[in-house]
Amino acid sequence: MNRPTDHHRPTDRYRELAARYGTPLYVYDLDRIAEGHRALADSVPEGIELYYALKANPHPEVARALREGSDRPCRAEISSTGELDAALAAGYEAGECLYTGPGKTPAELEYALGRGVRMFSVESYTDLQHVGAAALRLGAVARCLLRINSAGTKAATTGIRMMGKPSQFGIDSETLPELMPLLTSVPGTEVVGAHFFTMSNAVDEAGLVGEFERTVRDAVRLAEEVGLPLEFLDIGGGFSSPYAVPGERAEYPKLAAELERILDLHLPRWRTGTPHLAVESGRYLVGGGGFMLSGVVNVKDSRGNRFVILDAGINTLGGLSGLGRLLPAAVQLDGEEPQDVASLVGPLCTPGDSLGRNVRLPLLEPGDVIVVPNVGAYGVSASLLGFLSRPAPVEVVLRGDEVVSATRLEFTRAEAPAVEVR
Ligand SMILES: *Cc1c(COP(=O)(O)O)cnc(C)c1O
């Protein structure tokens, strides 16, 4: 199929979808999501579980595609009742979910345990106590991974000391000698392993390999020194994929062999499931499978600068721009060479509604449709959907040329029942 990433412009098929459903419009291509899934499965040795971080895109058809239709079905990494509901709606079983996050409330913990979730990543002693208290109320035992904020080790090759930073995530590893006896005796919980997530969007394969090696070494060292349980070890992720700019996801031709080498060296019984291993990814699995189509509403010159005003702003894409995240840097139409430099802005009444400054563009006029590739992850889910009260974009799911679904998130104001105080 002729895909928009080939040209950074809408194909006839995408133009037709934009005409049928209107813009702004997200298109998720399940064939491309399957490619991301296969690429991750090929990069990670068999026997290591793949977790899909629903934060990247909780759309049920997207999440479902990653569980079905592969001999390496993903499990679900979730962090809210909404993500749990999305995972269950997509066919994941509660037992396939890992519940993470630094601020798990008693109510959401009870909800999750009530739906059958038994695996939690905990980020502090008190977080573990909250999980335990909720489990006791439900007569359950929660299997917990201690998320570790590693103080770092002296890298053997470079001698550079990597210090852990203060963070709301994870338990400072240097506090484990003191904490371990407490952590292993919280009623309602059983600490079964560790969770590391030290990096997102690694710059290259060597960086990713180095980070995994450091993580595995840290885990083994903590097991030996403080008795960190290692029945289950989640070594995190960092698999890289472009965001809202043209390009392909990173390739990791050596990673599988390197991981096998690292694991054989440090955890010689990993091939028989001791420990049980997992990695996590959001953007690598689904980033390349999503496109956003947006209509040009107006083109305006102001004091020598051109503004292309779109019907999609940070309410539709790029809500994380306050964090300095990359925004679209390239848009082309009809294979034209870029002839213009302009700011791409959205329709919201805030100067912060910018999708790109000094972007090289073809000459655009009202009614044109542009396409932004690589927004299958952190597109709709990371946007300021409620800001300025515009409708959420339609999300169309394609398998081949067939439309599997076309839906839109709806917000309605409903009566809020008073919360029961415990
Ligand atoms: C956000 C997150 C992920 C996914 O990150 P990507 O960069 O999209 O792969 C995985 N695990 C945890 C714990 C996360 O917070």
Image (tube, rainbow, N blue to C red):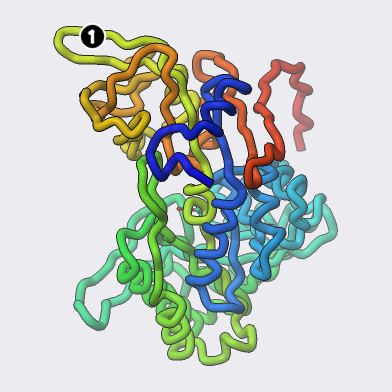
What residue is shown at x 59% (from left), y 18% (from top)? 391
Q: Amino acid at mark 1?
A: Asp
Q: Is residue 168 visible?
A: yes
The answer to which image quadrant residue 276 occupies is bottom right
Residue 130 pos. (x, y %): 66, 52
- 168 on left or right of 286: left
**Label 1 packing within 10 angstroms: few (<14), some (14-19), many (20+):** few
- Quarter of image, res 27: top right
Residue closer to the observer: 154 or 78: 78
Residue at image point 49% right, 26% down: 316
Compared with 13, 270 (above or below) is: below
Secondary structure type for disc 1: strand
In the rendered image, residue 55, in percent from the top left (x then y), is placed at 56, 45
Number of labels in the image equals 1
Q: Is residue 125 above or below residue 346?
A: below
Residue 119 location (% of width, % of height): 69, 62
Q: Position of residue 93 (x, y in %)?
A: 77, 57
Which image quarter holds the C terminus?
top right
User: Label 1 belongs to which residue?
Assistant: 301
Observer-nearest residue: 69 or 227?
69
